[in-house]
Amino acid sequence: MPQHSRKKLTSGKKVILGVGALAASGLAVGLLVTPSATAGGTGAAEALEQSKAAIADASAAKAAAPKARTLADGTADATVVSGVTVDGGNSARVGTTNTQTITVKWKVTGGSTLYGSNASIWRGTDQDSGLKQFILSEQFEADTDPCVASGAGTFNCTATFKIDPQRVLTNADAGAWKIELHAITEAPTDVSTENAKTWYLKRWSRLSNNAAPEPVAKGKTITITGKLERANWDTHKYAGYTQQTVRLQERSLTGSYATTSSHITGTGSLAGVEKQTRTATTDRCYRYKFEGTSTTPPVTATGDCVDVR
């Protein structure tokens, strides 16, 4: 099954073509190393142009190839992209120091020859005048194949992105991002979209929890203290997440956790802090839970059980 694993450059930009596609088109294979462009501003615009050039070159290779004999051989009448996911869902999270790998997956159907398919991630209102970030995949940068054939006219594709929060991100980058994706097969209709999926890049969160004292005498007061923090991509440290709803959950030693009350995290010197009290009656476990926002993922603290004597 032909699949794209080599590169053809007609405009001085990157494109990945299939072995079968190259043989069919009769075009020569060239190699040009272009600078990596993964940051905002000028770098984002350069990366966008590289992506556009790859799409144009794949379309040109398709146009130059002999036309399919008929559609009766199993070739569909349109290229279809489906199953687009980011890290297995619709969001990814990044901390303060470690480079994080973000994985985008999709499926291409509609033709046995794949002239080109790749994904890029970007942020902004539009690509013409509101582009903030545009990041090319590791596969695009390394001229490697993001797609493998998995049946007649079907390809499973995976693109990965290395995100260094200290080099690439600021707090303004948290929130909605988009996936630009193209897929070009010998089917008459191709896919080229600036927004194959809207997803959310989030600042890594953590939530501490402590119930004390332990052990405690029956009838005495138990204090449950927690602190909600999230990554700050401007300072590269964790900071308390203020004015956020956290839920206090409780259970018996053998039961399941259930929410007993909801509270708002503190500000100022108590940024992200929450503190509640309970009267000790029987052995019991406590924890805080945060449901998450569009910029911060959900997190549940490790439960802390108190021995009541």
Image: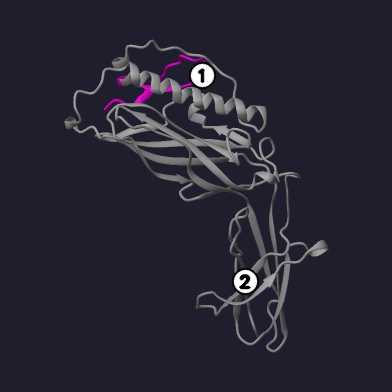
- Name the quadrant of the N terminus: top left
Q: Earlier in the sequence, mark 2 or mark 1?
A: 1
Residue at x 76%, y 45% (from the top left corner) = 235
The type of residue carrying mark 2 is Arg
Residue range (magenta): 1-20
Instruction: Classify residue 2 by image quadrant.
Output: top left
- Which residue is under mark 2? 247
Q: How is the image coloured?
A: one colour
**Magenta segment: does it hold 211?**
no
Q: Dot 2: what SS?
A: strand
Q: Is 198 drawn above or below residue 17 in the view shown? A: below
Q: Which mark is residue 244?
A: none
Residue at x 66%, y 67% (from the top left corner) = 245
Q: Dot 1: what SS?
A: loop
Between 88 and 84, the one nearer to me in the picture? 84
Give coordinates of residue 67: x percent, y percent: 25, 21
Left or right of 187 on screen, residue 170: right
Residue at x 49%, y 46% (from the top left corner) = 87
- Which residue is under mark 1? 13
**Which residue reaches farthest front?**
129
Between 10 and 223, the one nearer to me in the picture? 10
- Tell me if mark 1 has few (under 14), some (14-19) or many (20+) residues whose alpha carbon lies within 10 angstroms of its own: many
The type of residue carrying mark 1 is Lys
The reply to whether residue 40 is visible in this rendering is yes
Left or right of 85 on screen, residue 209: right
Left or right of 294 on screen, residue 186: left
Left or right of 274 on screen, residue 142: left
Q: Is 203 drawn above or below residue 261 in the view shown? A: above
Give coordinates of residue 131: x percent, y percent: 62, 35
Between 85 and 53, the one nearer to me in the picture? 53
- Labels in figure, total: 2
Give coordinates of residue 62: x percent, y percent: 34, 21
